Amino acid sequence: MVPTTSVRRFDEQFARQVREGDLRLNPFEAAALPYLSGRVLDYGCGLGNLAVAAARRGCTVVALDASAEAVGHLRRVAAELALPIEAEQADLRTYAIRGEFDSVVAIGLLMFFDRPTAVAQLEQLQSHLRPGGHAVVNVLVEGTTWLEMLDPSAHCLFGRGELARRFHGWTIVLNEASEYPASGDTIKSFETIVARKPGRRERPPAPDAGPQDRA
Ligand SMILES: C[S@@+](CC[C@H](N)C(=O)[O-])C[C@H]1O[C@@H](n2cnc3c(N)ncnc32)[C@H](O)[C@@H]1O
């Protein structure tokens, strides 16, 4: 893909973080971790610190991001630590998700898409989550004045409370608003949701089950 201006800036930021060994979970990733299990999709994984933490706890992770720097770093770490992480570079504005997941995560991603794309990708994430699985989504909301990394003609600030409304009918496990000061005396206003999809989680087949038991 041709990197967008924001992805080029993330490439620079990630290269600096790797050089400086700054690989901590951010607060949203730390909040997400306890809800991740089984097969995890991390959509817009950045450096993949959450993917690594989840894989260390026994998850298998598909981690996707447009940043070549981030994906290259995550692949090296996964190989060194022999962790079950599949890291791929992808433009998630147009990505078609394949398969089903026990947990889906999109932290700090959807604001970089225009509104119809952000909503369509959120719906795609919801539809590829298994019943009983957890979605963890973090977005910027209206009131945010930090716009320097966002394309003026193609970004999305969700309405306040909109994220929760878009998970209507799901069990809302966590719904949190938070504000952080940003450069140039601006503000980042976030909403983070953890929601459980309705329906019962199917038990995985027992390891010794025959093919007829797996159907
Ligand atoms: C704020 S960072 C969040 C990264 C990670 N989820 C975290 O919490 O640290 C936003 C991420 O979105 C990625 N991104 C932005 N536009 C993208 C696109 N069109 N396709 C895929 N990833 C994109 C950036 O490369 C960056 O890694």
Image: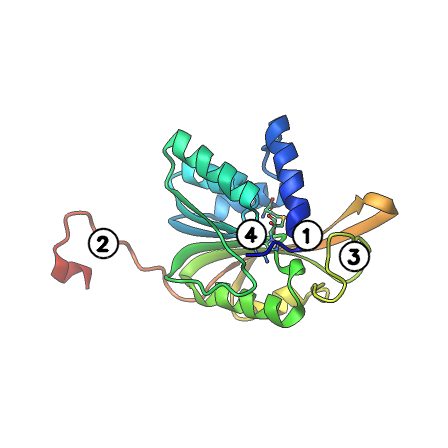
* SS state under label 3: loop
CA separation, marks 4 and 2? 35 Å
Q: Quadrant of residue 17?
A: top right
Residue pointed to by mark 1 = 6
Any mark on residue 66, and which? 4
Q: Earlier in the sequence, mark 1 or mark 4?
A: 1
Q: Which residue is mark 3?
A: 144
For the residue marked with disc 1, what is the amino acid? Ser
Residue 194 spot, x, y in % from top left: 55, 55
Q: CA distance from mark 2 to mark 3?
A: 46 Å
Instruction: Return the residue found at the far right.
Output: 185
Q: How far is the residue under mark 1 from the one under mark 2?
A: 43 Å
Whole-percent x, y for residue 47 in the image: 55, 40
Q: Which of the marked residues, 1 or 3, is nearer the chain's N terminus? A: 1
The kind of residue tagged 3 is Thr
Return the residue found at the far bottom.
116
Q: Which residue: 15% across, 59% down?
A: 213
At mark 4, the secondary structure is loop
- Image quadrant holding the N terminus, namely bottom right
Question: Height in image: 112 above or below 181?
Answer: below
Mark 4: is the Cβ under 8 angstroms from ligand 1? yes
Percent across and percent down for residue 40 are 43, 51
Q: Residues within 10 Å of mark 3 (few under 14, many from 20)?
A: some
Badge 4 amino acid: Ala
